[in-house]
Image (cartoon, rainbow, N blue to C red):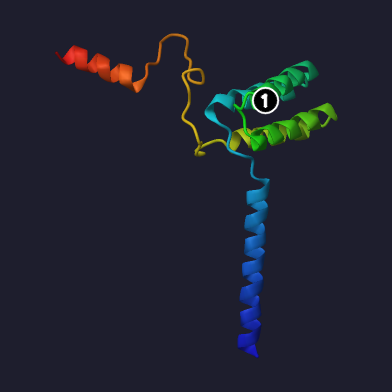
Amino acid sequence: MSSEVRKWGVVAAAVVAAAVGLFRWWTYPPAVEFDNLKYIQLLSTALSSRNSEWVDKVALAVTQRHAEGQMSDSELGHFEWLIALARRGEWEQADRVCFRFAEAQLSRRRSRPPTAEAHDHGDHQHHSAEATASTALVRSR
């Protein structure tokens, strides 16, 4: 009898662990492509400022990015959820969820590397690997 109880205890623990893991995976924000990370910051600013006009501008921008194929359905869905919270006046919750959204982007793998647009410092230019290699070859002669 004791081994039977232990067996069911192990099964129950495994089911609970799987359920918790599935719940965490299901509720974890999606990875956002490098070129779209700035929209999390823009939305965060709009939410913390409680500025509906800024929220609407972010909504328009992310919808446009999605229409252009620059944002995935899961990214757009998460932005739309946050925007809906703000539009219902749930500013604090939207702000907290947006913070977790931004936090979830740390050390995430993305399907595409950043473009020069996403990595613009304004004070210098980035060059392609081919151009950099060509420049190095010319300088070494």
Work out which residue is located at the far left of the displayed protein and give it: 141
**Of residues 69 and 75, which is closer to you in this image?**
69
Residue 14 x/y as whole percent: 62, 68
Work out which residue is located at the far front of the displayed protein and give it: 68
Classify the position of the C terminus by image quarter: top left
Residue at mark 1: 67
Work out which residue is located at the far right of the displayed protein and give it: 88
Q: How many numbered circles are shown? A: 1
User: Could you tell me which secondary element the residue under label 1 belongs to?
Assistant: helix
Residue 12 x/y as whole percent: 66, 72
Q: Is 18 rendered above or below residue 122?
A: below
The residue that appears at 68% across and 32% down in the rendered structure is 76
The residue that appears at 73% across and 23% down in the rendered structure is 59
Residue 120 x/y as whole percent: 48, 15
Snapshot quadrant of residue 37: top right
The residue that appears at 70% across and 31% down in the rendered structure is 79
Snapshot quadrant of residue 78: top right
Kind of residue at disc 1: Ala
Q: Badge 1 local density, few (<14 within 10 Å), some, or many (20+)?
A: few
Q: Is 100 rendered above or below residue 3?
A: above
Specify whether 49 is left or right of 102: right
